[in-house]
Amino acid sequence: MDLTLLRKELADAGEPCYRAEQVWEWAAKGVRGYGEMTNLPAGLRERLAERVPLSALALATESTADDGTRKALFTTAGGKPLEAVLMRFRDGRRSVCVSSQSGCPLTCSFCATGQMKFGRNLTASEILDQALHFRRIEPVDHCVFMGMGEPMMNLDEVLTACERLPDLGITHRRTTISTVGWIPGIEALTAQEMPIRLAFSLHAPDEALRSELMPVNDRYPLHDVLEACVEHHRVRRRKVFIEYVMLGGINDRHEHAVRLSEILDPKVFKVNLIPYNPTASGFEGSTPKAIEAFRAALAERGQPVTVRLTRGRDIDAACGQLAATG
């Protein structure tokens, strides 16, 4: 819902300011139309239905994976594509993975989104509308900014969206913002008060290999990003998640695990190993045996580590696969 347009329409109609919050409260509960907003006058409901779309995004396609994961392809009013995902877990968690940009300007070599043409930053309303779409299907309780785009390059709009996520049932402590290492954004996130989790997409334990995989490393070197993450932990007192995609023969050898354990303080970081999900990048994923050996090498050195459960791979909804292709 375009909250700016909503406020303007209500002001033009001479309605009191509290009407905007009434409309938002209904939207956050997952209603599918203004007709369900029973504490608004009937005439106002009709006017809003004509002039303020319930979503700022248009749903283009939607698909469901064998494991229950749902992926939605949206377009903005200007035709920019983006995707969002609802992940269902056996323990009852319902997590939405939202995009902060249409496409991504940072061109990580193994990521499908990085191969797209960059569109633009999304507004806070467009970010919220991704979560609201799935809230209309069922209750949600977690949110990860791990969809399209680099959230730290659009942090003002991301944080504005985060302020309203608790209304949908997603607390700040159950919200995670992921970054490839955009230091100004990490510093800004550290300085604000919402207890949002930070995740850092590291993917290589040395500068040369990381620059090869992720050009952003030339601008913000790994050493400097880790220092910013350590400072974030010092101020916020919450562990930083490390995301590490497992690329066969590239970053998955024993020496990589040893080096990773050397540069990460186990009191500050927790590592999530991510099985590589197929894209058109030409990379191959590590074997299950290699992933387990890498995990064991980290664990033996005292580094907290888990292997992430892959969701939605069969509909190109898994980590690194979002490319706005339907």
Image: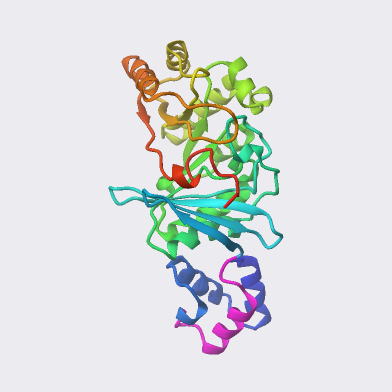
- State left or right for residue 174 relative to residue 164: left
Q: Please tell me in which quadrant of the rendered image residue 290 appears.
A: top left
> Could you say where residue 210 lies in the image, as x and y percent from the top left?
59, 21
Residue 195 shows in this picture: no
169 in magenta: no
Q: Give the range drawn in magenta.
A: 37-55
Looking at this view, name the residue that lies furthest to the bottom: 43
Left or right: 223, with 175 as reference point: right
Position of residue 307 relative to residue 159, above or below, is above
* Residue under the point 62% across and 33% down: 182
Q: Of 49 and 117, which appears nearest the observer?
A: 117
Q: Between 60 and 207, which is closer to the camera in this rendering? A: 60
Colour mode?
rainbow
Q: In this view, does 19 lie above or below 267?
A: below
Q: Which residue is drawn at 57% across and 85% down?
A: 46
Q: Identify the residue at image location x=61%, y=83%.
A: 47
Q: How many marks?
A: 0
Q: Whole-percent x and y of residue 56?
A: 61, 64
Q: Quadrant of the N terminus?
A: bottom right
Q: Against 98, is 153 above or below?
A: above
Given residues 228 and 269, the one toward you in this image is 269
Classify 120 as above or below 276.
below
Residue 93 seen anywhere in this rendered image of the structure: yes
Q: Where is residue 275 in the image (x, y as percent from the top left)?
A: 43, 31
Q: Where is residue 124 in the image (x, y as percent from the top left)?
A: 60, 56
Residue 43 magenta-drawn? yes
